[in-house]
Image (cartoon, grey):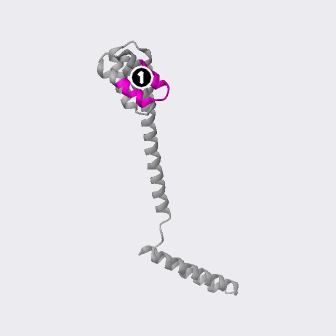
Amino acid sequence: LEAQFLLGVVYQRTAREEMALDLLDAVADADATHWRARFHLALTAAQWGMHEDARELLLQVQALNPTHEQTAAILRKLADLKEAAELDAADDAAAAAAVAAERAALDADTALPTEAEINAELEADDLEAGVRAAVDAGGAEQADAEADASARERRKEGRE
């Protein structure tokens, strides 16, 4: 059993993880107290990004050998990684919400005008052009009258 374990560790260190997993898993199954096989299984799981599996194996190692310092250190590191991932996810969600709110605000600011608003603006532009023409032609009195009429018209529309 010890020879299988050592060969599993050699495979692990020489980047032959699948072969290492097979041997280390067989050792862990054969001897429920073999904490070192579980520890190396956890290292391989962590290297493959299987952090939850690694954490579960390390908790088994800690139960079998509570004084193993590397196990405690790796468990702390996995907890830090999990917390960082949760914070990143929260930041991503907050950023997505901010973008959505910004888009909604832009959509509200850039809403297309209604036909009535367009017509009112065109009429105001036409009236203003007429006033300018009258002033340019020397008809200041006519311009004042048209401006007064325009003001009355706008007040009337405001009441409606």
Q: Position of residue 91 (x, y in %)?
A: 46, 41
Can residue 45 be seen by looking at this rendering? Answer: no
Give the image quarter of residue 55: top left
The kind of secondary structure element at disc 1 is helix
Residue 124 versus residue 55 in the image, above or below = below
**Residue 141 relative to residue 8: left or right:** right
Q: Position of residue 99 (x, y in %)?
A: 48, 52
**Residue 150 relative to residue 160: left or right:** right
Instruction: Name the residue rendered at 45%, 49% in the picture.
Output: 96
Residue 28 versus residue 87 in the image, above or below = above
Residue 140 versus residue 24 in the image, above or below = below
**Residue lying farthest top?**
67
Give the image quarter of residue 136: bottom right
Where does the magenta region start and end?
Answer: 6-25
Front residue of 143/51: it is 51
Identify the residue position indicated by label 1 in the image. Answer: 8
Q: Position of residue 102 (x, y in %)?
A: 48, 54
Residue type marked 1: Gly
